[in-house]
Image (tube, grey):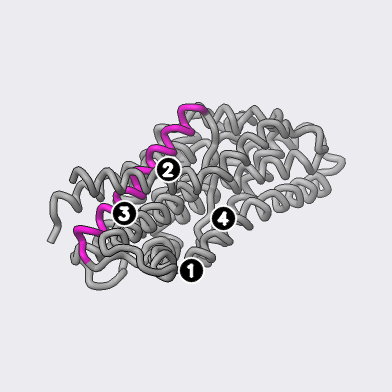
Amino acid sequence: MITTTLIIFICIALLFDFLNGFNDSANIVSTMISSRALSPRKALTITAIAEFLGPFIFGVAIAKTIGAEILILPPNPAESLPLILAALMAAVCWNLTTWYFGIPSSSSHALIGGMVGAGIADSLARQLSIGFVTAHDFWNIFRVIRPAGLIKTITALLISPLLGFFAGFLVLRLWRFLARGSGPGINFFFRKGQVATAIGLALSHGTNDAQKTMGVITMGLVASGVLTEFQVPFWVVALSAGAISAGTAVGGWRLIRTLGGKFYKIRPIDGFSTQIAAGSVILGAALLGGPVSTTQVVTAGIMGVGSAERLSKVRWGVSRQIVLTWIITIPATSTVAALIFFLIRRFV
């Protein structure tokens, strides 16, 4: 039965999805806009359409990872829905905060951190209700987490930026070798080629990131008894794909300026190489069911491409600020999610 609480939950999940697309639009279009391959509006429109189509083409393996392999939910919907709701609200708060300051952050990290924090807070609340007797009772708090799924997710989040960096480095070196001796006209090829590579990157982003919302909504449907098993309904796929593509169409201009110009002046070959490298890493992870941060992969790809020409080309001060944001995202959103959970538990 679909209740008012469940409808509110789905709406907040779609808001998170919209903000994910809003934040991550910069990842797809920043290099294309900076190298003048397309106008900003055309770039965002093409990207939004491709992101909508991504989940329908490449499947929903990541949704299962997010929705069924990270937390053990309480069997009672009255307990499980507030938990998931707190995780989503923490991720939304984090996305809005980092967008306001123009700092590229990871919606994936924010969601995972929120789920872990809310899950532990719920487990702590239930343990406090019966009291602590032994040290074993303390460790019971963490049994809400499924270790295999969390390790799989964290591994994907940690390894993917490294892969993005080295892929960007190698792809630029390869294209510089293949284009050696070419005249200025080669820039036309790289500039127009970014349209195709941007579509590929957008398809991979829609496949990877929209599935996180699909997994969370399906988790809520299972917890509420609407579904008897974890199987993503078609309407959830369509709503999630639509929300993330709508966010992308609006565009996060603060982040586009950061990624498009604060590292170094991006040329057509740089944008082309970044999109090939990042798209390959993100799509590969999506097919394997490993959630990754598009922000991290694209940012690392931009730095890898710049480093392939010369290390001094990259403004490493900006890079350090972004990496610091990545590091603190999971602890910060875990804490915020726990606080929100206790507020929900107290007043709702």
Residue 70 makes an appearance in the image: no
Distance between mark 4 and mark 3 Cα atoms: 21 Å
Of the pair 146 and 291, the residue shown nearer to us: 146
The residue pinned by badge 1 equals 147
The residue pinned by badge 3 equals 84
Outermost residue toward the front in this view:
133
Q: Amino acid at mark 4?
A: Leu
x and y percentages locating residue 151 in the rendered image: 53, 65
Q: Quadrant of residue 55?
A: bottom left
Distance between mark 3 and mark 2 Cα atoms: 17 Å
Distance between mark 2 and mark 4 Cα atoms: 16 Å
Q: Amino acid at mark 2?
A: Asn
Counting residues from the start of the chain, the first of labels 2 and 1 encountered is: 2
Counting residues from the start of the chain, the first of labels 4 and 1 encountered is: 1
Counting residues from the start of the chain, the first of labels 1 and 3 encountered is: 3
The residue pinned by badge 2 equals 20
Neighbourhood count class around disc 3 (C-alpha, 10 Å): few under 14, some 14–19, many 20 upward: many
Counting residues from the start of the chain, the first of labels 2 and 4 encountered is: 2
**Are dots 2 and 4 in contact, CB under 8 Å?**
no
Query: In this image, 191 relative to 71: left or right?
Result: right
Distance between mark 2 and mark 1 Cα atoms: 26 Å
Magenta range is 76-101
**Are dots 4 and 3 in contact, CB under 8 Å?**
no
Front position among marks 4 and 3: 3
Counting residues from the start of the chain, the first of labels 3 and 2 encountered is: 2
Q: Is residue 79 magenta?
A: yes
x and y percentages locating residue 344 in the rendered image: 25, 46
Of the pair 32 and 71, the residue shown nearer to us: 71
x and y percentages locating residue 70 in the rendered image: 42, 64
Name which residue lies at 47% across and 67% down: 149
Neighbourhood count class around disc 2 (C-alpha, 10 Å): few under 14, some 14–19, many 20 upward: many
